[in-house]
Image: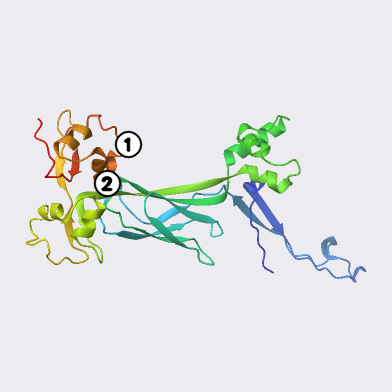
């Protein structure tokens, strides 16, 4: 006969002994000749199992694996893709995968086992210069907050009110809440996070199917002639371009002492808005604030409207 036990509630944490024996459940009540051996009716020797129930452990990622110093480098118009896999010591744990960052994930939840996801992102022409973490959260529902439980037990033994860690949850429950609903207050969401450092190259764009200088220049608020001038290897503005070809969409510029977006916009015949469009990391920066000396920007100048101010 198979035996099973699924610890689920907070009171299960600890060491327990499960003992069992096989007993003849015969309806015969009259002792046989010679009497019941040892005063019992056909009972086996008792066997005990020691059960050690631990608090829930965190999920962990098996992919992607990235060293902290490794950076995923991607070009605007190109794409980056990889798989995200998660595991947990408890084969019955319920885990969800979510994305914190640009791009999208397509999650696959198998009938048994843990979910996996396919991540993909194709940064548009407005993501140049962005650098940050693409992060994934593996969240297990029903994790046990053992510290809160220990405090609750201690206070209950002293006849005191529940600890602060439970008050907000208990107060949100209706007066008719069942014992099971109240017990959920001992439980919290446990999650693990894995991040991939990602950087989008400035001033370079990879053409997609159906794109040419004219269509890309329209996205950037300029014209095809400006883009052609930035690509010396293109012998003619009508040169055939193919999907996957990479073109320059601006000049790399190193900010100097006291440089501001407003000043650079005036010098190169552009606007602070367009500078922010070409440099994702400048968004939210005041146009009159001094830029970090030595920092790199992508500038798409208007050669017909540049100034010669010093």
Residue under the point 17% across and 28% down: 258
Task: Indicate the position of residue 294 as horizontal and vertical percent values.
Answer: 16, 35
Report which quarter residue 247 is drawn in: bottom left
Residue on which disc 2 sits: 69
- Examine the rendered structure and indicate whether residue 72 appears above or below residue 21: above
Of labels 2 and 1, the one closer to you: 1
Q: Residue at x 50, y 55 (%)?
A: 96
Q: Could you say whether the residue bearing mark 2 is in a helix, strand or loop?
A: loop
Quick check: 308 above or below 127? Answer: above
Query: Can residue 74 be seen?
Result: no
> Are circles 2 and 1 on residues that touch, CB within 8 Å?
no
Q: Residues within 10 Å of mark 1 (few under 14, many from 20)?
A: few
Q: Position of residue 124 (x, y in %)?
A: 29, 54
**Quadrant of the image occupied by residue 234:** bottom left
Residue receiving disc 1: 284
- Lower sequence index among marks 2 and 1: 2
Q: CA distance from mark 2 to mark 1?
A: 27 Å
Please state which of residues 246 and 184 is positioned toward the viewer in this rendering.
246
In-image side of 159 versus 73 (left or right): right
Q: Position of residue 261 (x, y in %)?
A: 22, 35
Asked whether residue 190 appears in the rendered view, the answer is yes
Residue at the front extreme of this rendering:
304
Say what secondary structure mark 1 lies in.
loop
The quadrant of the picture occupied by the C terminus is: top left
Horizontal and vertical percent for residue 304? 12, 44
The answer to whether 191 is drawn above or below residue 290 in the figure is below
């Amino acid at each position: 006969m198979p035996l099973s036990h699924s610890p689920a509630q907070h009171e299960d944490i600890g060491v327990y002994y499960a003992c069992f024996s096989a007993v003849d459940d015969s309806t015969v009540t009259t002792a046989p000749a010679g009497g019941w051996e040892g005063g019992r009716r056909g009972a086996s020797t008792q066997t005990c199992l020691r059960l050690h129930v631990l608090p829930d452990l965190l999920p962990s990622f098996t992919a992607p694996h990235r060293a902290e110093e490794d950076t995923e480098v991607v070009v605007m118009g190109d794409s980056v893709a990889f798989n995200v896999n998660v595991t947990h010591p408890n084969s019955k744990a319920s885990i969800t995968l979510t994305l914190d960052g640009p791009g999208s994930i397509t999650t696959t939840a198998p009938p048994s086992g843990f979910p996996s996801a396919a991540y993909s992102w194709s940064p548009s022409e407005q993501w140049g210069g962005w650098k940050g973490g693409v992060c994934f959260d593996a969240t297990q529902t029903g994790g046990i907050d053992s510290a809160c439980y220990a405090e609750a037990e201690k206070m209950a033994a002293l006849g005191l009110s529940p600890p602060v860690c439970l008050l907000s949850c208990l107060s949100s429950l209706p007066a008719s809440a069942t014992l099971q609903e109240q017990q959920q207050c001992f439980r919290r969401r446990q999650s693990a996070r894995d991040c991939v450092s990602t950087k989008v190259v400035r001033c370079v764009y990879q053409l997609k199917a159906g794109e040419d200088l004219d269509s890309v220049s329209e996205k950037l608020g300029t014209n095809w002639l400006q883009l052609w001038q930035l690509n010396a290897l293109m012998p003619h503005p009508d040169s055939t371009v193919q999907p996957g070809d990479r073109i320059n969409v601006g000049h790399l510029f190193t900010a100097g002492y006291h440089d501001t977006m407003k000043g650079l916009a005036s010098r190169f015949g552009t606007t602070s808005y367009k500078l922010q469009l070409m440099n994702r990391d400048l968004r939210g920066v005041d146009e009159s604030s001094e830029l970090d000396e030595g920092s790199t920007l992508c500038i798409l100048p208007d050669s017909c409207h540049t100034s010669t101010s010093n």
